[in-house]
Image: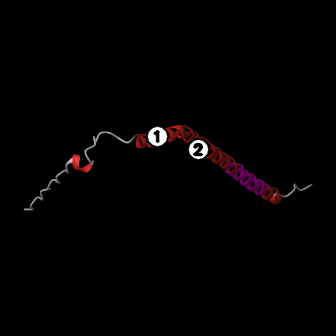
């Protein structure tokens, strides 16, 4: 039977000693301003980034559609050439009718 290890809790330090007697719930206004500016920048750029992603996806799908159309056209040309060759070979094998 395995023994379970018991985790020991680490004692928390006295907050007054850590922050020098200041209120630990107060945050420096420069810190909050910096965080706010980063959030505004991120939120402000996100619509443009999503539009750029949408346009890039649209361009990629259009390019794939054009590539598929080109491949289809090439394959149809190959089939047409093969059919023409087969019919030409049959025509060359046919003997002209004999005159009496």
Mark 2 falls on what kind of element?
helix
Dominant SS of magenta comes to: helix
Is 91 placed above or below 24 here?
below
Instruction: Give the x, y percent position of residue 52.
Output: 59, 42
Identified at 35% across, 41% down, the residue is 27
Judging depth in this view, the residue of 53 and 8 nearest the camera is 8
Q: Which residues are magenta?
A: 71-87
| Callout 2 crowding tier (Cα within 10 Å): few <14, some 14–19, many ≥20 | few
Tell whether label 1 touches label 2 (CB within 8 Å).
no
* Residue of label 2: 57
Which disc number belongs to residue 39?
Answer: 1
- State the residue in front, 65 or 53: 53
In the picture as drawn, the residue positioned furthest to the front comes out as 21
Compared across the picture, whether 30 is left or right of 95 comes to left
The question of residue 74 being in magenta is answered with: yes
| Left or right of 82, for residue 44 | left
């Amino acid at each position: 039977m395995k023994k379970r290890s018991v985790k020991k809790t680490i004692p928390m330090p006295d907050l007054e000693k850590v922050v020098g007697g200041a209120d630990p719930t107060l945050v420096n206004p420069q810190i909050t301003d910096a965080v706010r500016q980063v959030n505004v920048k991120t939120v402000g750029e996100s619509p443009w980034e999503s539009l750029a992603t949408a346009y890039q996806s649209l361009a990629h799908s259009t390019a794939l559609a054009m590539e598929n159309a080109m491949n289809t056209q090439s394959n149809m040309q190959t089939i047409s050439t093969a059919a023409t060759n087969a019919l030409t070979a049959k025509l060359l094998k046919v003997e002209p009718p004999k005159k009496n």
